[in-house]
Image (spheres, grey):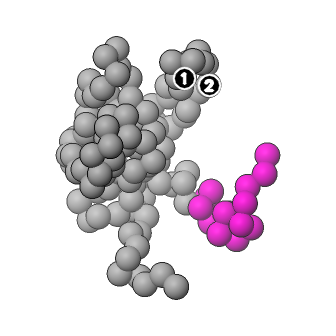
């Protein structure tokens, strides 16, 4: 049983404004419980995701761009507003060095809420 004190709420990513302060939480380079701050650099950004082994050809749309330090290991961690509401999930960085260069991306909470609600309702997502 989950106590409401152990959870965070979703905020509305559609209400974000460029320049708004955000907080990224993650586990960069295996350093757990790491917190960084930055600002929303842009909204509704599209970028193409790839890895060292696969080309960057899969678009991820409507992302939040932030300069909060997002490094390998932060992906999947929350991006929070100053009300401690989840406004995104840290997803990727653009880098030439393999670490933070000030260009990070998060999937917005308004998109996540739909998926989370479906997972809770159906216990899975197919297709």
Locate residue 99, reporting x and y percent: 30, 26
Residue matched to label 2: 58
Classify 10 Å Cα crowding around label 1: few (below 14), some (14-19), many (20 and above).
Answer: few
Q: Is residue 98 magenta?
A: no
Q: Nearer the viewer, residue 1 or 4?
A: 1
Locate residue 63, reporting x and y percent: 46, 38
Q: Is residue 9 above or below residue 103?
A: below
Per the image, label 1 sits on a secondary structure element best described as: loop
- The residue at the point 50 percent across, 38 percent down is 62
Main SS type for the magenta part?
helix
- Identify the magenta region: 114-127
**Left or right, 66 with reference to 111:** left
Residue matched to label 1: 50
Picture quadrant of residue 105: top left
Per the image, label 2 sits on a secondary structure element best described as: strand
Picture quadrant of residue 104: top left
Spatial separation of the CA atoms under disc 2 and disc 1: 7 Å
């Amino acid at each position: 049983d989950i106590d409401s004190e152990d959870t965070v709420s979703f905020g509305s990513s559609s209400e974000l404004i460029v320049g708004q302060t955000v907080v990224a939480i993650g586990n960069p380079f295996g350093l757990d419980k790491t917190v960084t701050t930055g600002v929303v650099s842009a909204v509704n950004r599209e970028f193409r995701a790839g890895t060292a082994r696969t080309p960057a050809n899969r678009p991820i749309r409507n992302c939040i761009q932030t300069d909060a330090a997002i490094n390998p290991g932060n992906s999947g961690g929350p991006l929070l507003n100053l009300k401690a509401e989840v406004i995104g999930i840290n997803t990727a960085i653009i880098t030439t060095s393999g670490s933070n260069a000030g260009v990070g991306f998060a999937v917005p909470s308004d998109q996540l809420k739909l998926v989370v609600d479906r997972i809770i309702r159906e216990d899975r997502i197919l297709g």
